[in-house]
Amino acid sequence: MGITVSNISKSYKGVKALQDISFEVKPNELFGLIGPDGAGKTTLFRILTTLLIADKGQASVAGFDVLKDFKDIRKHVGYMPGRFSLYQDLTVEENLEFFATIFGTTIEENYDLIKDIYVQIEPFKDRRAGKLSGGMKQKLALSCALIHKPKVLFLDEPTTGVDPVSRKEFWDMLKRLQQKNITILVSTPYMDEAALCDRIALIQDGQILQIDTPEAIVKQYPKTIYNVSANNMYQLINSLKDYQYQHSVYPFGEFVHYTDVRNDFKINDLKMYLEAEKLLNIKIEKTQATIEDSFMELAKYPNRTCKLSKT
Amino acid sequence: MKRFVGFIKKEFYHIFRDTRSLFILFGMPIVQILLFGFAITNEINNVDMAILDHSKDATTKEIINKISASKYFSIKQILERETDIEAVFKKGKVKAVLNFETDFGKNLIKNHQATVQIITDATDPNTANTISNYINSILQNHQQEQNKAIHIDYVIVPEPRMVYNPELKSVYMFVPGVMTIILMLVSAMMTSISITREKELGTMEILLVSPIKPFQVIIGKVFPYIFLSVINAVVIVLLSIFIFKMPVQGSLFLLALESVLFIISALALGILISTISATQQTAMMISLMGLMLPVILLSGFIFPISSMPLPLQVLSNIIPAKWFIIILKGIMLKGVGLEFIWKETLILLGMTILFIGLSVKKYKIRLE
């Protein structure tokens, strides 16, 4: 009853948006599609919600084929597009009521499902949707997508443009929905949100780089990562990039994530090099890889990692 | 059914909350009908003219008096020399000059013939033509009066009678035209915009991923506009009856039915436009350029179809407005019943069915 995608390809005017994508989402799973803008996430969502037809391959949602049974899918899924797509000139309550009626249900009937979310925006129920803040818009959109008790929920970048506090709340809500037997496919460009999913697929340029639990993906990171910091961030990055043994250098908050090509890397070697580069307050320490590090590593060598993920 | 009612309710919210569009929707018919009725007119009234009288005798004085007594002309200037004619036209002070030859009265008696020159400013050809005709008929009228005294063997007396609009009021011609334009505009443009707005704002995506059926969306979109267009039609008819004293000779019921038929055909066109345009702006441009212009130019509203070149005459047949204007004029001015306009009605009905069929077929159930 989850989602099955096998060998889906789709191109727009010669541009390959999706290339031979296959994966499976188990029932009641919270599955994340993680990738930058333009990776093909929205195209995949539209194919699964029967809005687009794939050039090649099959897919099924909640046991229904996306091509043959598109009418059944449209009855049983909830879809929240990336862009805010509710009626801005209708009030919060009118929007919710409208979506309830077109799905042949009422707000009262499924109120328990949306209660946790809706109580937060209920004080503003007479306000027009266009006048809500970003976080509240998302909550309303989620309520509207849930009002007919869907079996599968598609959320395309639900937290883009939402403040950190609302983002956190939003993910807490998704976790609770999962308890109510709803399969959730969610996409996000934020790597920190990936860790909150049961399993994730890293996607770039229409290809899946890796599919696994967030923990496993991090564990598979092939190198040791070091947090490096110094008095001058900009110069530090440049110096590290010029270092002959560097494997990767990425800024990460107040640190720089550094990996070395050598297996017998010694912290002191790097420290001496950076001191010679006239940097002060140099700190170097081992750290844990994050999803972002994994993604960067995979994106750097997509072919090699494809092989890796198969083993 | 509940789904459908919910959808229509939502459409009415959209319409009534967009006060600017609502204002255009109801303000436009009133403004247009008043504008066409009062300001834009083919009739001539109080045309300024000048006289150059070389003769200055009793006969010319009598003619001049007759002209200035009519409500069509007012004599602004008496000229003295031929050279003044050009000057007075160039200043734009008058639209026509009447130039009597020397000894006009004497010649008339002696030679039974005298000439008077009518010079008109033809920068506006239609008006020039009308003015010259009016002056002509005043002169002829004068001649007939004079001839009564004299016995002539053969006289043909033409007795022109203009039927259905004896006073040749141009408002009679404009009301059917304006009604057609407004119904076309409100119905086609508003529906096409309201459907493309859903596409543009992304709400169409959600509607597609829902159990609501395409025909429910289409009819739900169209229904409120049928309602509004009917109100507009009623307003126009009332305005023309009470302000312009335009008669409705035929049955009001038939008029209402034909109007609803035309409204539905325009709505179907609107849906068709929305299926081929992705944004509200394109929809508006197509509606304006693709519908408004043909309605104004090719429907016979302003320019008579019979005097168009053949290709345009053929083209005018595919414009629903042409048939609706014929029907309207028939019912309102001639007072005919369905037995005289069944052919036009049938054509309109055929077009409507074609448009609806096409738009349901072209309505996309997916995004591409």
Image (cartoon, coloured by chain):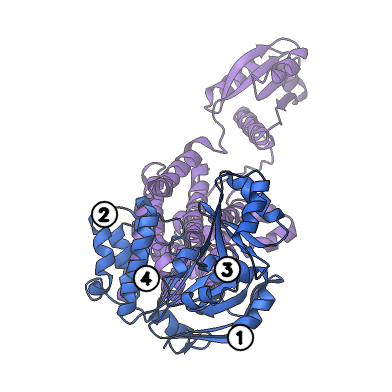
Q: Residue at x 61, y 57 (%)?
A: A268
Decide which of tag 1 and tag 4 comes sooner along the chain: 4
What's the residue type where badge 1 is placed? Answer: Lys
**Quadrant of the frame with the N terminus of chain A:** bottom left
Decide which of tag 3 and tag 4 comes sooner along the chain: 4
The numbered dot on residue A224 is 3
Decide which of tag 2 and tag 1 comes sooner along the chain: 2
Of badges 3 and 4, nearer the viewer stands: 3
What's the residue type where badge 4 is placed? Answer: Ala
- Left or right? Give the position of B353 relative to B144: left
Q: Colour of chain A?
A: blue
Q: Chain of mark 1?
A: A
- Left or right? Give the position of B48 relative to B238: right
Q: Which chain is purple?
A: B
> How far across and how far down the image is residue B104, in percent?
72, 18
Element under disc 2: helix
B133 and A73: which is toward the camera = A73
Q: Is residue A73 above or below residue B218?
A: below
